[in-house]
Image (cartoon, rainbow, N blue to C red):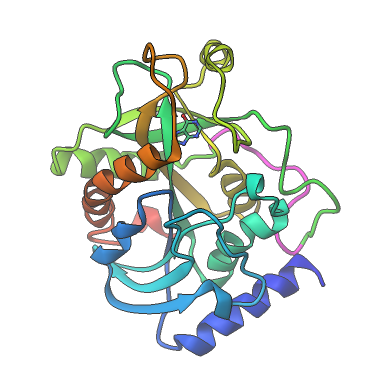
Amino acid sequence: MTELHAIDAAADAIRAAAPAAAPAVGIVLGSGLGAVADAVTDAVDIPYGEIPGFPRPGVASHAGRLRLGTLGGAPVAVLQGRAHAYEGHGLADVVRPVRTLARLGCGTVILSNAAGSLRAEVGPGRLMLITDHINGTGLNPLAGPNEAALGERFFDMTSAYDAGLQDRLRDAARAESIDLAEGVYYWALGPSFETPAEIRAFRTLGADAVGMSTVPETIALRHMGVRVAAVSGITNLAAGMVAGSALDHAETMTRGSAMAGELARLLARCLTAWPQPSDRT
Ligand code: HPA
């Protein structure tokens, strides 16, 4: 089966379960950030298990549910939880849910994740707008034969994170009095956290935050011509930055939940008066 067939089958199952939904904006909620979905009104939920080809996220508290509804003024499709490459999922599986959202009509997708900060002044609890990324894994969801029906073999990544969407998110943060940091996200495969030496190396390379997701989704969405924005919820200072402290996943989950309310306000504000003429693709 081609990937186009796979995402068509998934999109058909979603349309059958929610015939009235016509999502224009996709949202992916990262670790601990699932509660953003509480802000969605007129919600219809579809468990990933009822959508063919959707991988089951294995990480605790990734709900594994698609929520269709309205956020701000936009019809949205919210993926509550994602599969990660470090769980052993192939990258085609990892990106299938976002490709399906694109196939359903989402011309814009906003990704979120939990991340460690490489900058002491951007501490836990801050949201960070991702302005660019570094793929530190050497993996790419598009390695292999190109499916021309999805996109071109070679495509530009100069503006992977859409400038207009970044401006909208900056404006929304200002309106909501949210202190939005900005920076470059480094994709590390995980599941082990980084060593202090790796963190120093990533900082030298130009990274501001590190996490284990998002980049493959950005790549697959840009391949399909979808506009992408992404926001990290900073859950911790990266390895070695706080003397005598160790990293653990429980901290990621607790900090993530604390930020979910702020992220919900940011996204709802960003999506009011949607679409503007410049938002149409
Ligand atoms: N490293 C990688 N992924 C993460 C981190 C981190 O420090 N925090 C949350 N996700």
Residue at the image point whose x is 38% and y is 11% from the top:
243
Residue at the image point whose x is 46% and y is 42% from the top:
162
How far across and how far down the image is residue 148, in percent?
78, 59
State the residue in front, 4 or 51. Answer: 51
Number of disc labels: 0
Relative horizontal placement of residue 231, taking residue 168 as reference (left or right): right
How far across and how far down the image is residue 25, in percent?
41, 62
Residue at the image point whose x is 19% and y is 37% from the top:
178
Q: Is residue 151 visible?
A: no
Q: Is residue 196 visible?
A: yes
Relative horizontal placement of residue 120, taking residue 268 as reference (left or right): right
Question: Above or below — where is 259 with respect to 20?
Answer: above
How far across and how far down the image is residue 181, in percent?
31, 28
Relative horizontal placement of residue 267, taking residue 162 as reference (left or right): left
Question: Above or below — where is 63 with respect to 215?
Answer: below
Task: Find the residue positioned furthest to the right.
Answer: 145
Q: Quadrant of the N terminus?
A: bottom right
Residue 155 forms part of the magenta stretch: yes
How far across and how far down the image is residue 160, in percent?
54, 39
State the residue in front, 89 or 11. Answer: 89
State the residue in front, 274 or 241. Answer: 241
State the residue in front, 108 or 230. Answer: 230
Residue 231 forms part of the magenta stretch: no
Residue at the image point whose x is 57% and y is 76% from the top:
49
Magenta residues?
149-159
Question: Above or below — where is 94 with respect to 206?
Answer: below
Relative horizontal placement of residue 85, taking residue 26 as reference (left or right): right
The majority secondary structure of the magenta stretch comes to loop
